[in-house]
Amino acid sequence: MTRGLAVSADAIFQRCIHPTCGGTAAMDDTSFACPKCGGLLDVAYDWNRLQPPTSLTWFERKWAERSDPLHFSGVWRFRELLPFAPPEKIMTIGEGQTILQKADIVGQFVGLNPGCLFLQYEGMNPSGSFKDNGMTAAFTHARMVGANRAACASTGNTSASLAVYCSATGLMRAVIFIGSGKISYGKLAQALDHGALTVQIAGDFDDAMQRVQQVSKKLGIYLVNSVNPYRLEGQKTIMYRILEAMRWEVPDWIVVPGGNLGNVSSFGKAFIELMELGLIKRPPRLAVINAAGANTFYQLYERFGLRWNNGAPKKDVVDGYFRSLDVEKIRAATIASAIEINHPVNLNKALRALDRCGGVVREASDQEILDAKAKVGAGGLGCEPASAASVAGAKKLRREGIIAPSDRVVCILTGHQLKDPTATIAYHSTDQKTFDDVLGHRGVRRATYANRAVQVPNELDDIIKAIELYS
Ligand code: F0G
């Protein structure tokens, strides 16, 4: 049975997230800003006309039809919950084959009972990060509106993902904006290898983000950053796959690193819609973890008490905060380069998500992030520094008693370990200079869980002795 596939343009449109504004835009509009107030837009559905499924177990029937690429994709097998694209327009490269792994060793580090910590490993995507969930959706929309160039600003993963989709399909030219010296080698390598036009600007991600919005508008290039609400539609499916892996039971907590705040926004929308459709009874709680060196969301939410406030977050609080960053010349700075962002574009959507899902925000220092990362690695899954912020944050919330030892907690591992080997090697290095050069100036003092290489002369006896001693 096929449901929800007839795309009727007026049943799908874009709508301002602020309920009192009422601004809307057509499904094919690519300005990605409310025409009335300039705010963020959602992709909105008139569910009454789209026939969504009446139970989540309904999706299981697609497992038997994995030879169909739209059922194989971990994004599009849920397409009745993101029904904006006609099947023939969908661009999939097999994204979303990711796993939810029970992780007791890491769970012990976090302070949870056995069987309570789960890691959602998004590093298994074709480009090695969660971004592919969103990119397949944005790319599909770009194709629906006839775009032939797509652009993004990136700390590395969005650009890698865009480069992969453009090169794999040959349908579009990728134009990527990166800050100078701000991108890890693994991610830069991907952009270059996959043939993206790479524009390295003298500035950081926040500068690049501003520029790419200006340039896309001027040149009519399709923008794939997470201000694009179609991208967030794809990222909702990370939550569907978690529910699926938990046999459709809702966990107590979803913990996610926060940068531009696209992920948490899409997770919130996923749960708000599942509630509206009567497909779940309660949402999980959401925890967003900033790096301490890029902690705008933490400051605004936890220190200044900024809230969604029925769609009217206090603008003077936000403006005042950003003014103080400018006056004090504070730029984002963290070893977790993927989330080195001080001006998150999805701030208001993230506030809505936390409002509806009982959210909290915490910050984790670079020391805490790297220690958590080493524990995640020792527990069997390799992630990049930003991803480990989720585990570091869960540990903190557990210590504070906000997460209980028996809560079922899912930490999102957003990107693969090999994205950023520099930080990993420095952490485990026997060489103090390597450690200091990469980590020392960031306040990282110890490699608490380092697994150091053993240096031995090239002599059989010495090698055997060393193995006997250390194994
Ligand atoms: N984790 C990783 C590995 C990321 O690459 C990003 C964002 C995040 C977490 C934060 O997610 O922005 O949805 O809050 N990377 C973007 C990029 C900014 O350009 O690749 P978010």
Image (cartoon, helix red, strand yellow):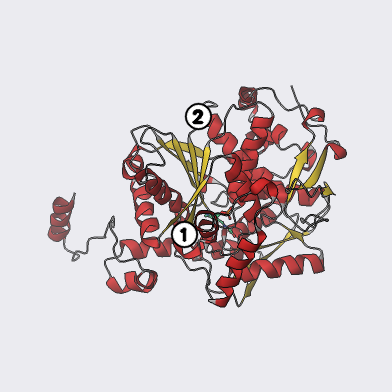
Residue 404 x/y as whole percent: 38, 36
Which residue matches tag 2?
246
Front position in the image: 245 or 468: 245
Ligand 1 picture quarter: bottom right
Residue 455 x/y as whole percent: 22, 64
**Which residue does the image show at 30% across and 65% down from the upper left?**
429
Q: Is residue 95 above or below residue 222?
A: above
What label does residue 291 carry, if any?
1
Front position in the image: 390 or 77: 390
Front position in the image: 184 or 88: 184
What label does residue 404 carry, if any?
none
Amino acid type, residue under disc 1 in the picture = Ala
Image quadrant in which the N terminus is located: top right
User: In the rendered view, does 454 fall on the left or right side of 202?
Assistant: left
Mark 2 lies on a secondary structure that is: loop
The answer to whether residue 136 is visible is: no
Residue 143 x/y as whole percent: 79, 50
User: In the rendered view, does 341 fall on the left or right side of 152?
Assistant: left
Residue 207 x/y as whole percent: 63, 71
- Between the C-alphas of marks 1 and 2, the distance is 29 Å
Quarter of the image holding residue 269? top right
Q: Characterize the local packing of mark 2: few (<14), some (14-19) or many (20 or more) Cα atoms within 10 angstroms.
A: few
User: In the rendered view, does 10 fall on the left or right side of 414?
Assistant: right
**Which badge, 1 or 2, comes first in the chain's sequence?**
2
Mark 1 lies on a secondary structure that is: strand
Front position in the image: 149 or 153: 153
Amino acid type, residue under disc 2 in the picture = Met
Q: Characterize the local packing of mark 1: few (<14), some (14-19) or many (20 or more) Cα atoms within 10 angstroms.
A: many
